[in-house]
């Protein structure tokens, strides 16, 4: 239950941040061009909301009368009448010589938090959106409405949300590399090579292979190599320290890896460093401590099965519940090494009560890069661009049979967050989701920003504006498609849960 809450909290927090930034992009450009924003909401608010607030506004605008927002019993119609009276009295006062009151950048907008965490919205006056406020569209256009602005201004307002999400991702990546730098073991330094998952071995990878190139591009940094290898046509590896082997990557390999990662037996996601099995901690009272295992011991075999690396040790250890196994360990003794065979009693979960070294830099030479504030910005741009390119390439496979099966909803999104709170991991995932949200929103589907952009580009090119009735129908179709997709994606999560 604690794990579920931690993952759910991270998902909701990340989602809230991304929604705020996305909608603020629309809000900012709308206000810059003098367009009224009626509502700014985090999450959706069908029927009711968790919280709402609107800046104070006085009848007449001169502070002489009662504050409209202090009268909660007014109906929406009465609110509009008071606001109309406010505008009329203010205009009369200005005509009589009173100074013109400067309009507030933030005012006249209702801010709130909805109860349904499926997104958020910025209700822009005079725009056909998910609210489908057709009554407003029947009235004569006002100069402060979206529909009254030039096409280029409307285009910038619609693109702004996607732009802000992408800029947020760049900012997060730049902040991460500035704060932590980069530390990794170059593949060429990993003398034991890499261990590969079952699906990777099916297409030709062997444990011990060292990745060299992906479609001719040199591979060194594991943080960038995985996606390049998955999306490449050919990956070149060094095998047995001397032979270079080209491995063909199937087009739908990413889905095989995704299904493998969701299985209960998944241990490796594509590949991991092969490192010795070194004991870093021995828990008092457990099987290893009772048998005499010591910190620093390296396990090289279980019974008669050799376990030269940690991945082989973990795989071999499975299935020995409540059993006694003979561990062959190498123990440093001054300058010499002693090889011992030690019987150890395992628990019902095949555990012996030890901590194991998992950091490859404990065994191989690592590379560490520190970034200044100025250096972190181009690195953040590079990382954001790479993530966007990789996501776009992987999305084209979603429309295949295997891709449709791999679609997931909020359960799948929550699963990618760590079980324990880790701010670096959280921001890394939030940045990736921000890139994904930007890409999904720019797709030319009615009801998404990309749908509005498509119609605006049509207007710019043809100098003909689509009819409001057409836009209304397109919005209905787009919303229907999104609802179906939402139901399907979360339904697939439920199906996988019961499987």
Image (tube, helix red, strand yellow):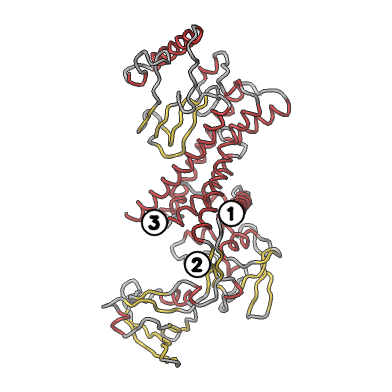
- Give the number of callouts: 3
Q: Is residue 90 left or right of residue 200?
A: left
Is 213 positioned to the left or the right of 54 in the image? right
Q: Is residue 311 visible?
A: yes
Q: CA distance from mark 3 to mark 2?
A: 22 Å
Counting residues from the N terminus, which is met first, the one under dot 2 or under dot 1? 2
Tell me what residue is drawn at x 49 percent, y 31 percent: 122
The image's mark for residue 374 is 1
Q: Nearer the viewer, residue 247 or 229?
A: 229
Question: Which quadrant does the N terminus fall into?
Answer: bottom left
Determine whether the residue tagged by mark 2 lies in a helix, strand or loop.
loop
Q: Nearer the viewer, residue 486 or 63?
A: 63
Looking at the figure, which quarter contains the C terminus? Answer: bottom left
Q: Picture quarter containing residue 107?
A: top left
For residue 205, above or below residue 463 = below
| Residue 173 percent location from the top left of the image | 54, 53
Q: Quadrant of residue 112?
A: top left
Looking at the rendered structure, the secondary structure element under dot 3 is loop
Q: Position of residue 313 (x, y in %)?
A: 45, 77
Which is closer to the viewer, label 1 or label 3?
1
Q: Residues within 10 Å of mark 3 (few under 14, many from 20)?
A: some
Could you say which disc has been placed on residue 268 in the image?
2
| Spatial CA span between label 2 and label 1 | 36 Å
């Amino acid at each position: 239950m604690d794990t579920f809450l931690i993952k759910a909290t991270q998902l909701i927090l990340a989602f809230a941040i991304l929604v705020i930034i996305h909608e603020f992009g629309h809000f900012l450009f709308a206000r810059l061009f003098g367009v009224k924003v009626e509502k700014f909401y985090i999450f959706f608010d069908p029927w009711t909301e968790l919280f709402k607030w609107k800046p104070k506004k006085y009848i007449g605008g001169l502070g002489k009368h009662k504050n409209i927002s202090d009268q909660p019993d007014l109906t929406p119609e009465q609110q509009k009448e008071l606001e109309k009276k406010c505008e009329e009295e203010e205009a009369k006062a200005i005509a009589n010589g009173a100074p013109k009151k400067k309009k507030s950048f933030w005012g006249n907008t209702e801010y709130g938090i909805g109860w349904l965490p499926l997104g958020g919205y910025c209700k822009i006056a005079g725009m056909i959106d998910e609210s489908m406020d057709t009554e407003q569209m029947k009235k004569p256009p006002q100069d402060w409405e979206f529909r009254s602005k030039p096409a280029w201004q409307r285009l910038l307002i619609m693109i702004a949300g996607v732009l802000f999400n992408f800029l947020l991702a760049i900012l997060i990546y730049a902040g991460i590399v500035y704060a932590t730098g980069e530390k990794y073991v170059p593949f060429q330094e990993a003398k034991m090579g890499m261990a590969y998952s079952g699906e990777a071995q099916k297409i030709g990878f062997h444990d011990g292979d060292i990745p060299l190139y992906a479609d001719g591009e040199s591979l060194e940094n594991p943080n960038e190599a995985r996606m390049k290898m998955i999306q490449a046509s050919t990956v070149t590896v060094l095998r047995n320290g001397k032979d270079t082997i080209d491995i063909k990557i199937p087009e739908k390999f990413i889905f095989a890896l995704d299904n493998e990662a969701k299985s209960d037996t998944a241990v490796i996601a594509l590949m991991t460093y092969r490192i010795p099995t070194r004991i870093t901690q021995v828990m008092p009272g457990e099987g290893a401590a009772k048998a005499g295992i010591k910190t620093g011991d390296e396990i090289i075999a279980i019974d008669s099965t050799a376990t030269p690396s940690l991945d082989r040790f973990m795989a071999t250890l499975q299935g020995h519940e409540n059993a006694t196994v003979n561990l062959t360990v190498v123990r440093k003794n001054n300058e010499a090494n002693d090889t011992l065979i030690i019987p150890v009693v395992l628990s019902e979960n095949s555990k012996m009560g030890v901590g194991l070294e998992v950091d490859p830099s404990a065994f191989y030479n690592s590379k560490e890069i520190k970034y200044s504030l100025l250096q972190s910005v181009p690195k953040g741009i590079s990382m954001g661009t790479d993530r966007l390119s990789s996501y776009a390439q992987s999305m084209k496979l979603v429309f295949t049979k295997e891709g449709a099966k791999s679609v997931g909803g909020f359960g799948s999104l929550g699963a990618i967050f760590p079980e324990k709170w880790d701010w670096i991991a959280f921001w890394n995932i939030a940045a990736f989701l921000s890139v994904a949200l930007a890409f999904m929103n720019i797709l030319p589907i009615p009801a998404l920003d990309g749908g509005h952009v498509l119609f605006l580009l049509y207007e710019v090119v043809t100098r003909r504006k689509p009819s409001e009735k057409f836009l209304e129908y397109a919005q209905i179709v787009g919303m229907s498609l999104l609802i179906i997709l939402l139901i399907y994606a979360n339904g697939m999560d439920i199906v996988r849960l019961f499987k």
